[in-house]
Image (cartoon, grey):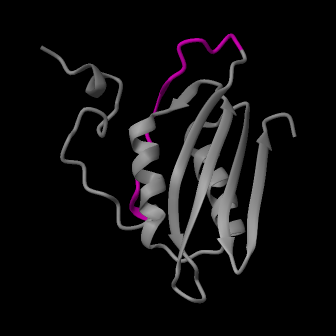
Amino acid sequence: MTDPQKDRGLSLLGTSKTPLPASPEDATIEVFANQSPQRDYTITLDCPEFSSLCPVTGQPDTARIIIEYVPDAYCLETKSIKLYLASYRNSPAFNEEIVNRLLDDLVAACKPRTMHVRGSFSPRGGISLTAEASYSQKS
């Protein structure tokens, strides 16, 4: 019997022993063919437990990351996104840098019609930070 995930070119889905990537550079973002490319529809990915490290203090930063996109030919595979986002847990970066890198990496992987990434970071020193970045094929 053939493995339907492997037939689609997916290597992470259905694998229970997938190691957590050490960094975003080590992560693999997988995609699969959009089954309704003729239609605009929105996919929302919500990661309420994102974590990274402050590049200055080394303290952990936590955030809710929301990724909304209108796919074109490809959709993001969610297990690979889970592992990709988790790979930031030991990566030092400023919050704004993270949101922009997420957008760049995800757009490069799936080439959507539009994408919007929002990072709502937990308060540090009494101040919350929210950063948002957008992409559109039309611009």
Can the viewer see residue 29 in this picture?
A: no
Image position, residue 44 (x, y; %): 62, 32
Give the side of residue 138 with respect to residue 42, left or right: right
Can the viewer see residue 55 in this picture?
A: yes
- Write the residue at 34% across / 30% down: 9
Image position, residue 72 (x, y; %): 65, 25
**Quadrant placement of the C terminus:** top right
Q: Is residue 96 above or below residue 47?
A: below
Q: Which residue reaches farthest left?
A: 1
Residue 33 is covered by the magenta coloring: yes
- Write the residue at 52% across / 82% down: 59
Image position, residue 29 (x, y; %): 45, 45
**Quadrant placement of the N terminus:** top left
Query: Which residues, given as a range, are shown in magenta?
Result: 25-39
Residue 76 is covered by the magenta coloring: no
Q: Which residue reaches farthest right?
A: 139
Picture quadrant of residue 124: bottom right
Give the side of residue 126 with respect to residue 98, left or right: right
- Write the residue at 64% across / 37% down: 111
- Taking depth in this image into account, of 32 and 99 the one nearest to the observer is 99
Picture quadrant of residue 107: top right
- Taking depth in this image into account, of 66 and 139 the one nearest to the observer is 66
Q: Which residue reaches farthest front?
A: 126
Image position, residue 128 (x, y; %): 74, 67
Main SS class of the magenta portion in the image: loop
